[in-house]
Image: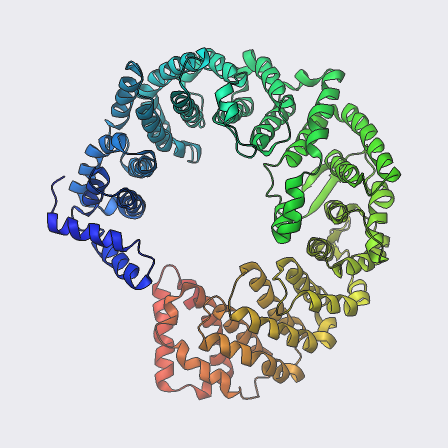
Amino acid sequence: MGTDGDWGGQITKQLECSLHPDASVRRPAEGFLASQELRPHFSLILLQLVASDSAAGHLRQAAAVYLKNVTKRLWEDFPEPDRLGIKSSIVDVLLRANPIVRKQLSEVLALAAAVEYPERWPDLAPSLVHNLTSAYSRSPPDWSSCQGILETLDALFERYRFQYRSDPLFLEIKYSLTHVHDPLLCFYQTTSASVLKGSMGTTELFIALEGVRLATSIFYSLSWQDIPEQIENNLQEWCKLYLCFLQFSCEPVERSASPTEPTVIENIQVLIVDIMEMFVTKYDEEIRPVLEEFVSAIWNLLVQRGTQSRYDELVTTGIRFLSAVCKGPYFELFARPETLQQICERLVLPNVEIRDEDRELFEDSPLDYVRREIEKSDTGSRRRSACELLSGLCVHFESSVTEAMSNYVASMLQEYSADNAKNWKLKDAAIYIVTALAWRSGTQAGGATSTSTLVNVVEFFSSQILPELTIGQNGGRSPNPMLIVDCIQYAIAFRNQLPKESLRQLLDIFVALLSNKDQVIHTYAAVWIERIFAIVDVDPQGRKTPRCTVEDVSAILVPLLQVLAHRVGPGVPENEYVMKLWLRVVTVTRSSFQPHAMGSLRHLATVVVAVSSNPGNPNFNHYLFETIAAHVRFACVVEQVHSFEEVLFPPFQTILTSDVQEFGPYVFQILSMLMECRPSVHALPPTYAGLLQPLLGAALWDRVGYIPSMVQYISGYVTRSSANISVEQLTSILGIFQKLVASKANDQHGM
């Protein structure tokens, strides 16, 4: 790695400056480094700095991070000698690096290998495997080197999990397995024997266990696309080792365990369960001889684990595995009534209850809680996994499972009735159980489209859900706001099944809940109302009619708008779900909204002014401007165009003069719509002409997101006020459209 020493010193100095907290020092250094990235030897100097024992630790780490980032962006543009130099030396540097730097170099290697391996880097896998074999064959084994090599192999092969199936991919995996499989299995056997014997020192034990975890992850990656011949031929040996680790516990590891973070053993077990789930869903014939052993081992593992959050990933992964088994061809493993009973009692019931972590999120981060629940981003939670297992059991054992769980639900509701303040969690769990039992098909966006014939969702709503919702409407006090929220969630899930004749009453209830001061409750109420307004019924002749008519909406429109104005405004948390409801109200009522349009628009204009100073929530901002656009589209009559312009021009001009880039496209879109609302015989106000000239400059057209709305604005202006366009402006307009037509990415806007 021969390099220019003076230049190397300059790079080192600028790298140091790029870490400086003062922007006036940091930014010039960043600019210098960026300008040197493709200069010959630049990447080699970084690698040389990483390898230097005399360099400060923070500089070596910074060099490794910079090398990783520049490799990710520009590897194929590196000079060929630089690429050859990195490939020839990075493994040696990696093996001598400390763990933090080694992690970065492993990613550098994986990024380069994604392009080079195996055709232009055929000796990579053989070199890594040779070093691995040498490291664990020593006496005593060099566990630290083993870990570094395995980290690199893991990073190298992890991409196999996410790539599309193709012949070149399978050839690459086959090439990798030819060199890696046997040494990897040998490492696993040797290390497992040492670990399970219990004779290792604590430090060596933890490093060796991390090596086992990495080797397990490598196996997972190599078998993800298809089960290779090498793995299939040795599957019994792999499974024997995996079963040992599913039953393994270790006192030194337990002593150092955190109540919130999984131990390395639990991380190994999670990977093994993931592998077994993969085999059940993709390679069921190959795993059939040992499946019952794994079901038993994973079952025992789950029932022995407590409620501490350190076990969450293991428990949810294990439950997901059992769900896959009960949905697949080997569901008969669960056919015995006592087996179903134990699953319900020992897995479903304990894990479906609300947890302290859920309550903390509810209280501390209300909108994060809403997003997690509404958008179902909690797929890894115990509760969600338990419900999925219940739904999976119902695929083949619906009658038995529904009967057993119905008894538990009845008992829970009875205890709640006896002391609702103390036992509200039981009713909350019962609602989740009934939802899981009843749901048969549907989507989160569209709600349930079919339900179980064994569960009367409407009767349960009337007897158990509606009374809780009515408490809030009548000013009563609920045992807990989380119970109200889960009642609303039930109503959201089964909104398609609710009788139409009850909608007027329910709309009154939910408008009242929208007034609730609890942020999660009023957000859920907004979601329910918005989704009810979106339901469209289709009759046998294929005719579509909205579930809620304009008359239904108009009956609650005044109180609904009053509440919305209270929930959306300057100084109020930006709630995209409430804003989306406002948009839905305008699009449903359309011309019937016209009497309320000006008051609504004035309020929204104040919100635009507030968010323009510091744009934050992009979803909220999107629905805000779409709501304003809906006002113009559906509620702006000719007589009111001037009034609309008087309200909107001031905040829009502020946005454009302040160059709030996030909002520029919305402004031009809405102004174009206002132009279209004006009679063609009327001249446009001077404000429109004043905006035309800035649009004819080149700067704004470099912003790709601006192009559609600017084209719409110019087209509208030409149509409405062509007589006021000068020759110079016309020439500029023609030049813009000619440039658009010549662009493959934007030609549709110039046609």
Residue at the (63%, 21%) spot, across then down: 304
> Residue drawn at (68%, 78%), measured in percent from left and top?
598
The coloring applied to the image is rainbow
Residue 537 spot, x, y in % from top left: 75, 52
Does 636 sit left or right of 622 as displayed?
A: right
Is residue 675 placed above or below 153 in the rendered structure? below
Observer able to see residue 31: yes
Would residue 74 be found to the left or right of residue 703 on screen? left
Residue 614: percent from left, percent from top: 51, 67
Q: Position of residue 429 (x, y in %)?
A: 75, 37
Q: Quadrant of the C terminus?
A: bottom left
Depth order, front residue of 564/13: 13
In the image, residue 484 lies at what x, y percent? Answer: 77, 48
Which residue appears at 75% of the width and 57% of the height? 546
**Quarter of the image where one finds residue 726:** bottom left
Position above or below: 127 against 353: above
Quick check: 702 above or below 171?
below
Image quarter of the N terminus: top left
Is residue 272 in view from this perspective?
no
- Residue 565 located left or right of residue 463: left
Residue 324 occupies which quadrant of the picture? top right
